[in-house]
Every structure is written in structure tokens, then in C-alpha cells.
Image: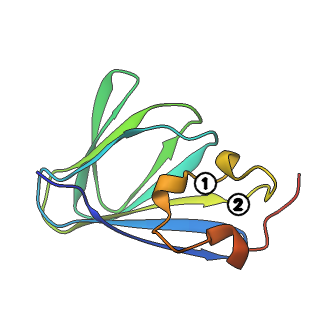
Amino acid sequence: MSTPDVKFAVAANIFCRMMHFKEAGDVEHGHAHHFDHITLLATGALRVKANGLEQEFQAPHVIQVAARVKHELTALQPNTIAYCIHALREKANPQEVLDPNAVPVGQDALAVAHPLLM
């Protein structure tokens, strides 16, 4: 069991984090966000644990994840690909927008975007 390969992109105030689960059983460990977001399951299948419950999803599917809900993603098939997608909100308060652990070393996602000020 390992974690998925992760790549990300930021454009037009949209953050997109691609997770490639190469093997069944690969896990994106439990985490929560300060904002609602969607996870677009493009290929394969995922088990999502949230609020003590589990649910399985088969691609193609859009999964809604509410703010502050700890969730964990486990691939049920090899080559499962999912994308976490959300709007960038406020440059002055990046922890409300983007978990720093989601950004590869040396990258400043907010510097290349034009965040919306609320």
C-alpha cells in the first residue's frame, strides 16, 4: 500500500490536484479542508471514508466533499485517477484555500494564480 502520485495545476482561480493511484489499495490518507470541494473520479473506483462511514464510487463520478469533513480515499482498482478541484479564494489567507502539503516543494500555487478576493 502506498500513496498516489500527485500533480497539480492552477489556472483562472481554479486549483486542480490530480491523484494517480497506480495500484488497488493505494491510499490518500485522511485529511480535511476549510472549504467544500469536489473530487472528480475519472477512471477506476474509490472507497471514500468520511464521518465514520464508507462509500464506494465507480468512475465516472463527481464526489462532493463538505468543508471540515475528514476524508480518506482508497483505490479499489489499479490506475484509478481522481482530481480534487476547488476555487482559489483569498491570497491573504492561503490556509483557507490550499493545504500547503498539497503543493510540491518549490512551487507557489498562489503566485501563479489570480485569487478571488472575498
Residue at image coords 69%, 45%: 96
Mark 2 or 1: the one toward you: 1
Q: Where's residue 12, x and y in %?
A: 72, 76
Q: To which quarter of the image does residue 18 belong?
A: bottom left
Is the C-beta separation of discs 2 and 1 under 8 Å? yes
Question: Furthest-front residue in view?
Answer: 106
106 left or right of 117 in image = left
Within 10 Å of the Cα at label 2, are there few (<14), some (14-19), or many (20+) other Cα atoms?
Answer: many
Q: Which residue is mark 2?
A: 88
Within 10 Å of the Cα at label 1, are there few (<14), some (14-19), or many (20+) other Cα atoms?
Answer: many
Which mark identifies residue 20?
none
SS type, badge 2? loop
Residue at image coords 39%, 36%: 71
For marks 2 and 1, the one nearer the N-term is 2
SS type, badge 1? loop
The kind of residue tagged 1 is Leu
For marks 2 and 1, give the CA distance.
8 Å
Question: Furthest-top residue in view?
Answer: 52
The kind of residue tagged 2 is Leu
> 97 or 61: which is nearer to us?
97
Which mark identifies residue 98?
1
Q: Where's residue 57, x and y in %?
A: 29, 47
